[in-house]
Image (cartoon, rainbow, N blue to C red):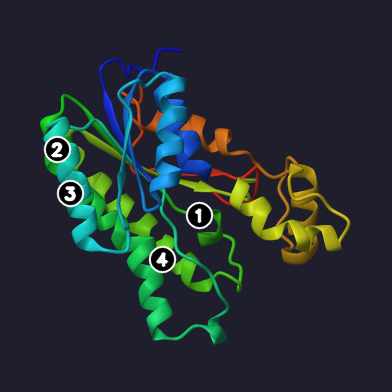
Amino acid sequence: MDLGFAGSTAVVTGGSKGMGLAIAETLAAEGVKVAVMARDQGALDAAVVSLRAAGAPEAFGISVDMAAADSIASGFAEVAQRWGHLNCLVHTIGPGDGYFEEMDDAQWDAAFNLGTMSAVRSIRAALPMLRAAEWGRIVTLSAHSIQRQNPRIVAYTASKAALASVTKNLSKSLAGDGILVNCVCPGTIVTASFTENLKDILAADGLDATDPHDVMTWIDTHFHHPCDLGRAGLPEEVASITAYLASRRNGYVTGATVNVDGGSDFI
């Protein structure tokens, strides 16, 4: 299927690893000129090599601290200087987690700054370029936990719920500009960071943190959040639906909150 990406441009925030990198690689394979933003320069450099190999020879990375408004503005100013317009913005940044009793006001502020305000600031900076393009799309990555609560990630989830609300609202205000705005909510996805952070914990239960079926067994046992397919997801499975929503081929889906969770009771 031709997604209509010929000659288009995209920024993927958090595009140096995990789901963000998988999305950027999928866009690159479709011929999109891709810029990725993340904080770590080494990870950015590695991502750019991967994106160029995937099909985006003009791919580049910009070191941006998504917790800092000035850094975000500077990063998008560089994109504007290079391209002048932008077809797609995909925002994948998320904060840390913690239980309610463990979190003070500063940690709550940090969660919303990174989980919600980084998107607000990125979209604000990107809007002039999106409006200057022939067509424009915005896709944010929220989380399945906004519908399926987990006490371990209370501030993370609250910030992602706010992001989903902002995304829905923007779909209405930007419809007149022809800019389609959607939100993707991944379920449990086996990324490299997920595996690294939880490999010892799953190993204590005799499970492999790289195995999607073992991961879902652990999730079901400890959090009672199974999925219909009986396994966790993979980054490329989030990337495929995100790429469609970010594409010109998507001409009529806007304001949607799309679960990519292997099947659940939530709509």
Q: Residue at x 14, y 38 (%)?
A: 80
> Tag 4: residue type?
Ser
Would residue 257 be seen by someone viewing this image from the given angle? no
Q: Between disc 4 and disc 2, whose residue precedes? A: 2
Give residue 159's mark.
4
Q: Which circle's residue, 4 or 1, is located before the other in the chain?
A: 1
Residue that carries the numbered disc 3 in the rendered image: 125
Mark 2 touches mark 3? (CB < 8 Å)? no
- Please, what secondary structure does the residue beneath circle 3 have? helix
Q: Earlier in the sequence, mark 2 or mark 3?
A: 2
Q: Residue furthest top?
A: 2
The crowd level at tag 1 (other Cα within 10 Å; few <14, some 14-19, many 20+) is many
CB contact under 8 Å: marks 4 and 3: no
Q: Is residue 182 above or below residue 32?
A: below
In primary-sequence order, the first of circles 4 and 3 is 3
Specify few, some or many for label 2: CA neighbours under 10 Å numbering under 14, 14-19, or 20 or more. Answer: some
